Image (spheres, rainbow, N blue to C red):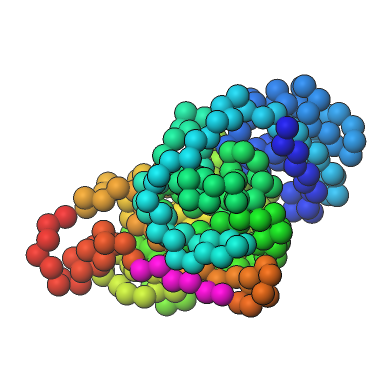
Amino acid sequence: MEKVMYFVEEEEEGLRLDLYISERQEELSRSYIQRLIKDKLVMVNDKQEKSSYTVRTGDAIALSIPAPRELEISPQPIPLEIIYEDQELLVVNKPQDLVVHPAPGNYDHTLVNGLLYHCKDKLSSINGVIRPGIVHRIDKDTSGLLVVAKTNHAHRSLAEQLKSHSITRKYHAIAIGNIKENNATIKAPIGRHPVDRLRMAVVEGGRDATTHIKVLERFGDYTYIECQLETGRTHQIRVHLSYIKHPLLGDEVYSNNKVKFNIKGQVLHARVLGFIHPTTQQYMAFEAPLPDYFNRLLQHFRGKTNNSY
């Protein structure tokens, strides 16, 4: 049984209990969360409430998640590009098309399967059997840097840095259209889409979200940008860029534009990751080079290649 505790913040007041939990446990369906509430596995201020309960500032919500039947997450010899590793943590450069952790219907060939093979039993247990060592995630089709905790001490330290927005996370991306401002900040709250529950959206009452954008290069119909996260909401960069009418090239969820190039998924790469080491207290920063497909696109836009897309 995995147990999680949440405290409702002021900007979150007014959400239904089941919706509040679903925004923090994206891998759980809302119907499953409602069943947990009905089975008395969700308590609010040590009392049982219905799914329709409206959360209030300061509410203490205790969630107990039964261990899934598929507990045998097997180690698999998946090639990992490890940028840095010590006794406390490791930094890995995740390729496109690799899911970070197992989920229903997808229990094999994930980053976690490869980490279990590489690290054996030396991964933090805070996020349970399904997500050992996973402090933060990036989407399947997003490439780039992730920090993985090998000890619970490291996990708590890194999670606190994420919560306080002190971790440096810079992404490189190609957006559709010409972004005119050289530097811009998008501050728009993000929550579940009111109709399509599989998508996120800028919604009133959503969680605070801030993305800083810097234009690196313009190609007329496309703009090469750097996005620095101040917060880390689900699909934040993808949602914010779509919100300002410049969705990411290749984004099949948040863009209505037909992709003209032979690419798979959004052109988004977690390039820079910086944090304070949990033990040495020294600031560490890492940079992952752009993947080949990203470089080929840039060369194509710059007119420096004859490659056809």
Viewer-nearest residue: 44 or 140: 140
Q: Residue at x 60, y 51 (%)?
A: 122
Vertical position of residue 212 compared to residue 31: above or below: below
Residue 140, how many percent across, how many down? 42, 46
The image quadrant where one finds the C terminus is bottom left
Residue 288: within the magenta? yes
In this picture, residue 193 sits left or right of residue 32: left
Residue 289, how many percent across, how many down? 36, 69
Residue 191, how many percent across, how many down? 61, 46
Q: Residue at x 83, y 33 (%)?
A: 43
Viewer-nearest residue: 136 or 174: 136
Can residue 194 be seen by looking at this rendering? no
View extreme (left): residue: 306
View extreme (front): residue: 120
Vertical position of residue 104 compared to residue 127: above or below: above
Q: Main secondary structure of the magenta part?
A: strand
In this picture, residue 56 sits left or right of residue 75: right
Q: Residue at x 86, y 29 (%)?
A: 48
Question: What residue span does the magenta drawing correspond to?
Answer: 284-289
Residue 210, how many percent across, how many down? 59, 63
